[in-house]
Amino acid sequence: MLAFTAVADRVSGAPSISKLSVHGLRIAGPTRIVIDGGELLPNPQIVLPFPVTSQELQPGGTAARVEIEIVLGEEVPVGIYQLRVATDSGISNPQPVGVDHLPQSLFQETLQTLPAALSGAVVANQSLRIRFSGKRGQRVAIDVEARRLGSVLDPVVRLLNARGTQFAWSPPRPLLAGDARCAAELTEDGEYTIVLHDRQFRGGADRFFRLKVGDLQNADLVFPLGVQLGKPAALQLLTVGRSDPVSATVDASQAGPRPARVEQSRQFTGAFPPVLVSDHAELLEQQQDDGALQELTAAPVAVNGRLTTPGEEDQFVLPVTPGSKLRFDVRARRAGSPLDGVLMIRSVDGKQLASNDDRPATSDPGLDFTVPAGTDKIHVALVDLQKRGGDTFVYRVSIQDLGRPDFQLALSTDRVNIPAGAGQLIEVQVNRQGYQGSIELTVAGLPAGVEVTSKTIAA
């Protein structure tokens, strides 16, 4: 672990955000948002990870509450982003907000037009009801963003017809980080009612939500889950419950998780799934003739595939070096896939050498494996524990050679506020894996007057 110093020549402090009036911003339109917190003056400005077209502080602001009208440009990508407030005294903690083309408003009991997004909170023992008029054959999706925005609400949402009969509903779903979503085609003209409550009927200001209603489209999964740095790749966005994948792209110019993107995103709402851009080969599962197994390149390598039919088992041949130690990591559930994977390592004659189902921190399988003497190839197999399958049962198997020198860096904070003319220590955590050399640090995008004075992690 290392500390380095940044020196500033201006006054710094720390505003804070405790509450937002609305939990979404509209693309290509204005949104008024009330921000509660502390030290919000002077000169508050909303900070987002993309340019803002305009923002105007409304009269009557105090250090504890400000109201800002913000306008986003048409070019802003749909997603969930971190909103902060910067003042002459520093920058605040982040608050997640949804960004899309939906009109944003406070909770109301009647929706005059669809689509719409409503922000509010659930109090104890409360079931909120929202009415709207619908037409036969109209598709209506209801998506509750709560957990994805930092709320502790466990949302349950129900759709009732004019007779009070429930014909669509959703409990908290793991795929949505514990949020709820349902969709239905309306069966008749008339009035419909949406009912929203906490699963345990608990309530409070920390059980806030953003309820979206309309003919919405969500991107739950992306395939493949990984692409190689600098290589073009054709991606598909998948939605659970729908069979119409959408073509997408990703900026593969930088390593790390990068959001998938679509050209026409007006109907989309919610976060786009990330694609992992890696610095090694990212292969696609390929159908082989006559029962042959697909051969992978040597580690480091990853293979991306999906178990499309029930009971399917994908198998691959991996060239290996005797005595080498390999790390196998399956990414499926962590990416939103319903796949409950079982990973198996076999000899070429079919003898099982190792297997894993779940790990302590994840339900995705993974294991470390030392290649036996005299072995130059092994078989890698993946199957669903319950023998299920389908287009959304996507996976990525990453294989790393633990003998290859490597390291990872992590920061212990998400922001730094520096007193005028002084410095600040920032802890950088270093996880070395066989690499014992020095590490040179660079920090991009520093504001004027801020410099890094210690840039080297010693060997």
Image (tube, grey):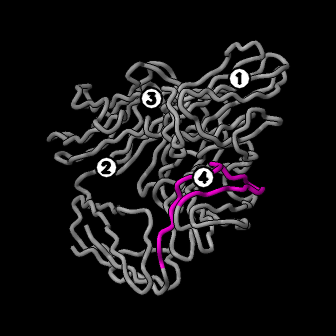
Relative to 297, is 234 on the left or the right?
right
- Which residue does the numbered mark 2 point to in the structure image? 400
Residue 284 position, x and y percent, is 49, 41
Q: Earlier in the sequence, mark 2 or mark 4?
A: 4
SS at mark 3 in the image: loop
SS at mark 2 in the image: strand
Between circles 4 and 3, the one closer to the viewer is 4
Amino acid type at image mark 4: Leu
- Which residue does the numbered mark 3 point to in the structure image? 339
Q: Earlier in the sequence, mark 2 or mark 3?
A: 3
| Labels 2 and 3 touching (C-beta < 8 A) | no
Residue 174 position, x and y percent, is 48, 32
Between circles 2 and 4, the one closer to the viewer is 4
**Could one spot residue 350 in this view of the protein?**
yes
| Labels 4 and 3 touching (C-beta < 8 A) | no
Q: Earlier in the sequence, mark 4 or mark 3?
A: 4
Q: Which residues are magenta?
A: 12-37
- Which residue does the numbered mark 1 point to in the structure image? 184
Give the spatial CA distance, label 2 vs label 1.
Answer: 44 Å
SS at mark 4 in the image: strand
Give the spatial CA distance, label 2 vs label 3.
Answer: 22 Å
How many residues crowd mark 3 within 10 Å: few (<14), some (14–19), many (20+)?
many
**Residue 143 within the segment the image draws in magenta:** no
Give the spatial CA distance, label 4 vs label 1.
Answer: 31 Å
| Labels 2 and 1 touching (C-beta < 8 A) | no
Relative to 185, is 4 on the left or the right?
left
Q: Earlier in the sequence, mark 2 or mark 1?
A: 1
| Labels 3 and 1 touching (C-beta < 8 A) | no
